[in-house]
Image (spheres, coloured by chain):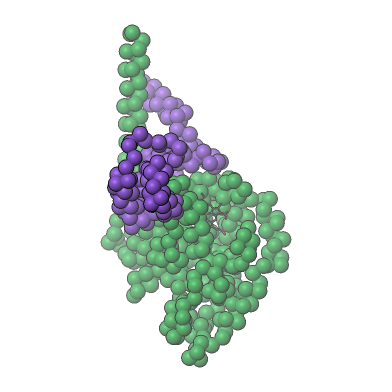
Chain colours: A green, B purple
Amino acid sequence: MRTRLWISIVGSLIAAQCFGVFAESSAQTTPKAMASEQSAAAPEDIEAQVNLDVEVFQGFFAKRFSAVEFADYRNGVYALDEASREQWLEIEEFPPYEFSVDDGETLFETPFANGKTYADCFDNGGINIRQNYPFFDETLGEVITLELAINRCRESNGEQPLGYKKGAIASISAYMASTSVDQLMHPEVASDAAFKAYNEGKKFFYSKRGQLNFSCADCHMRVSGLRLRAEVLGPALGQATGFPVYRSKWMELGTLHRRYAGCNKNVRALPFAAQSTEYRNLEYFQSVMSRGLTINGPSARK
Amino acid sequence: MNLKKYVLTSLCATVLLGVLPGCGDSATDLPASDTASAVSETGIENTDLSQDKSDVALNATEIEAVLADAQEKLQIGSASGFGWTTTADLLAQAEQALEEGELERANELSVELSKQALASTQQASYSDAQWMESIPR
């Protein structure tokens, strides 16, 4: 009788203490994380917050995979997985995307009905500029990705927009990326509006979704480098640098947003449309996190 | 910190780490069962069709009401960007079963749909308030 009483007292104390511990730990972490959500910050505060995010994010991987060189993160999962890296290097010797890049070049150079070309829409005639995307357009107040810019170029020249996930748009984007290999990604977050878009992408990245209740970070950070069924989970760092990719599974090129939709569906979450505001903000956040890496699209993936 | 508090804290930590797989060290492999522990972090139950045979007398009007309620919740979930790919099929199957007068099946499906609809709204509000909990530290 007495023992039971004793047990129940200790039990309730443990429970109380546990809740206390939980409350303490969440009270410690929340305000700091929330700071990034506040709006109307001074530009130098925004820069400081974004720099801190980048430092923490890249620091996470530096610690988790101390043997991996920073520059190698542009190679996705092959930066981590020795076994599949060998196969991949062989594939990259005769890249399966080569024909698509050629197609892309032809499409890129073919004039629209009005006689103009893609080159007329882009800085430097569209060559060696992939690294400048995505960026936050301060006038339009939204994130502009390369694929969006390609379609807006078409529309402003009286052409129909292309589908966003594969086909012609992936080829054109692949060609444009191929002229920008080894260029540094350096997306800026320079205004309140840009910071808001960035934060929305950040929130998307860390939000749990779908029936399986996983966030991007759960797979591509917390368990990165480990195996999920047959696949090793690649690092979130560098995810935007190699696109578009030729996936053996697709047997064709696909865009980053096609992959986003696939990852959403894998956890049984309804995907968003390619080039939706949600996915563009996500791409923006991911690109900022990959600051300092270089472009190496298009690339081959399993 | 006094000794008692210290002992209780460590006792508590041990109990917690033992009880909650995946809470102590998140860097574990990811078999299907990990899904359940990830799901339990938000308090969202993983649903299982076979678990929930309810004893309610089956009546088409009631099932319709359950379905209507579920649809409302589904809309909240997907309007906030947290729709699931599993629900459209469930809804279609439930409606078909109802139409064919298979009340037991219609009931099971609509109960499952309700659970998922509720869980997706819970996930939406959890994510809205606590997404930063997924930032690895």
Q: Nearer the viewer, residue A185 or B117?
A: B117
Residue sticking out furthest to the top: A1
Q: Nearer the viewer, residue A228 or A27?
A: A228
Q: Residue A128 location in percent, x, y?
A: 55, 76
**In which quadrant will I find the C terminus of chain A?**
bottom right
Whether residue A33 is visible: no
Whether residue A170 is visible: yes
Residue B127 lies, with reference to residue A48, above or below; the image says above
Q: Residue B39 location in percent, x, y?
A: 43, 41
Query: Measuring 54% from the left and 69% from the top, which residue is drawn there?
Result: A166
B80 sits left or right of A299 in the view = left
Query: Measuring 32% from the left and 17% from the top, which residue is drawn there?
Result: A9
Q: Quadrant of residue A103?
A: bottom right
Q: Residue B35 location in percent, x, y?
A: 48, 42
Q: Residue B123 location in percent, x, y?
A: 37, 47
Q: Nearer the viewer, residue A284 or B6?
A: A284
Q: Quadrant of residue A187?
A: bottom left
Query: Measuring 41% from the left and 66% from the top, which residue is drawn there?
Result: A276
Residue A75 lies, with reference to residue A171, above or below; the image says above
**In which quadrant will I find the N terminus of chain A?**
top left
Query: Measuring 34% from the left and 71% from the top, which residue is drawn there?
Result: A141
A77 sits left or right of B88 in the view = right
Q: How many marks?
A: 0
Residue sticking out furthest to the front: B101
Residue B89 lies, with reference to residue A109, above or below; the image says above
Residue sticking out furthest to the bottom: A115
